[in-house]
Image (cartoon, helix red, strand yellow):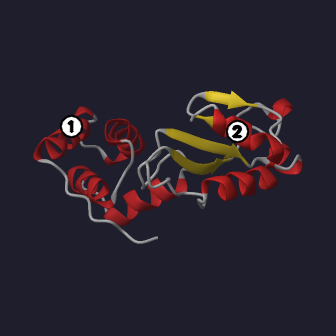
Amino acid sequence: MSHVKVELKKEDVVKLKEICKSFDNKGGELINVLHQAQTHFGYLPAEVQEIIAYELNIATAKVYGVVTFYSFFSMTPKGKHPISICTGTACYVRGAEKVVDEFKKLLNLNVGETTPDGKFSLGCLRCVGACGLAPVVLIGEKVYGRVSPAGVADILKEYE
């Protein structure tokens, strides 16, 4: 994935510093700081990570490691309707992979990408705790259960 340079506005830098300060600039609060920053920006580009690393006095590589380890964090802007497909064991066994493939085909997207119009982004997550409804798809906060590849087009129609 190519890295797009993000120019942070002065007020965004001030806001980031405030977020860090609200957690006493402690390195041990990194995950809380990242959650707050992602809530504010919608995602965590490298420039945001660098400021957080500087403010908390920890290595940028450590911040990057945490951001890439936890699937909740995103380094790319999410779409207006973020699609998350569960690929946990129950969903996987019941065909989640085929559901992922159908979303990829219909949206012409790979996992981790956002449509050019910013409408949809596609991601996978581990377990949403709705295993009885496997395979499960989340679009924003809305849960779709027992999703089949054939049902993907109808789900997308709801967002036209």
Helix, strand, or loop for circle 2?
strand
Residue type at mark 1: give it: Lys
Give the foreground label among 1 and 2.
Answer: 2
Q: Is residue 142 above or below residue 58?
A: above
Which residue appears at 83% of the width and 35% of the height?
Answer: 146
CA gap, disc 1 and disc 2 = 37 Å
Q: Please name whichever residue, 63 or 45, is drawn nearer the observer in this view of the structure.
A: 45
Callout count: 2
Residue type at mark 2: give it: Val
Q: Residues within 10 Å of mark 1 (few under 14, many from 20)?
A: some
Residue 12 vs residue 113: left or right? left
Q: Residues within 10 Å of mark 2 (few under 14, many from 20)?
A: many
Name the N-terminal-most of marks 1 and 2: 1
Q: Quadrant of residue 112?
A: bottom right
Q: Which residue is mark 2?
A: 137
**Hey, which residue is sitting farthest left in the picture?**
10
**Hey, which residue is sitting farthest top in the picture?**
142
Which residue appears at 56% of the width and 35% of the height?
Answer: 160
Where residue 104 sits in the image (x, y, percent)?
A: 66, 57
Q: Is residue 116 above or below residue 133?
A: below
Helix, strand, or loop for circle 1?
helix
Which numbered marker is on residue 149?
none
Q: Quadrant of residue 32?
A: top left
Q: Which residue is mark 1?
A: 21
Where residue 137 sits in the image (x, y, percent)?
A: 70, 38
Q: Is residue 100 above or below residue 36?
A: below
Q: Are marks 1 and 2 in contact (CB under 8 Å)?
A: no
Q: Please name whichever residue, 155 or 122, is drawn nearer the observer in this view of the structure.
A: 155
Which residue appears at 46% of the width and 39% of the height?
Answer: 80
